[in-house]
Image: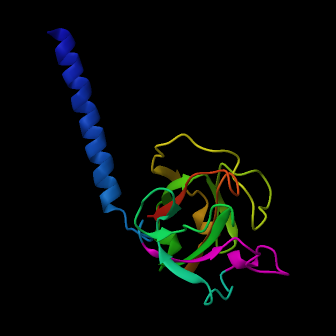
Amino acid sequence: MVMRRKGWLRVGVWSWILLLASAAWAQAALVIELESNWRYHKATEDPSPGRPGGWREPGFADAGWLVGPAPFSYGEGLSGTDLSDMRGLYPGVQLRKQFVIPDPASLSALRVRVVSDDGFVAWVNGNEVLRFNVPAGDPAYDGLALGALTEPLPLETYELPGFRDWLVAGTNVLAVQAMNTSLGGSSDFVFMLEME
């Protein structure tokens, strides 16, 4: 009976922790929703030729890019943007999304939740802020992730420290290069991101 009480107490404490964490997450303001529209470029060629990485900068002209909702995927049967032509033709996508922060100094934290199969690098206003399962250094436009991941993939949460150094008051730009582990050997790909 004592064992049962301890087990019940442990479950009760964890339930409260999960409830409080959920309440805190719910109170945070969503800046980018999981299924929002992004401008995207299929990595068949450099999106900013002559200016490697120029596509990550806030002033880059992306009006000619495609527009579609997340998640970006193939081989997963998800809603969103189906990249059914990706396998064997291009190893990833470049994504751009504008978001507005009226006063960066008023923020206590900035974080993202991401599902990525297989890797990505993220920049805000041209500053690298997050990297997952990607080799060190500046990625080529057709760069690859380090390796395949075990599925099912979790929705991972990442804090973005130092956000006041690169956010501006008003419109900001999040640029992401989402990468597969190979050009033709992978059976699937997925990327989606939420910011709060």
> Whole-percent x and y of residue 56?
69, 75
Total tally of numbered discs in the picture: 0
Residue 15: name its quadrant.
Answer: top left
Residue 24: name its quadrant.
Answer: bottom left
Viewed as shown, does residue 53 lie left or right of 75? right
> Whole-percent x and y of residue 113?
47, 56
Q: Which stretch appears magenta?
A: 36-57
Vertical arrangement, residue 101 with respect to residue 158, above or below: below
Q: Residue at x 19, y 23 (%)?
A: 8
Residue 110 visible in the displayed image:
no
Confirm whether the magenta stretch covers residue 44: yes
Viewed as shown, does residue 156 lie left or right of 186? left
Viewed as shown, does residue 83 lie left or right of 145? left
Residue occupying the far right of the picture: 50
> Whole-percent x and y of residue 193?
49, 62
Residue situated in front as seen by the camera: 195 or 179: 179
Residue 95 visible in the displayed image:
yes
Where the C terminus falls, by quadrant?
bottom left
Instruction: State the colouring used for the structure image.
Output: rainbow
Q: Residue at x 18, y 15 (%)?
A: 4
Residue situated in front as seen by the camera: 171 or 178: 178
Residue occupying the far left of the picture: 1
> Whole-percent x and y of residue 174?
58, 72
Q: Residue at x 62, y 51 (%)?
A: 186
Where the N terminus falls, by quadrant?
top left
Residue situated in front as seen by the camera: 191 or 32: 191
Residue 45: name its quadrant.
Answer: bottom right
Viewed as shown, does residue 111 lie left or right of 173? left
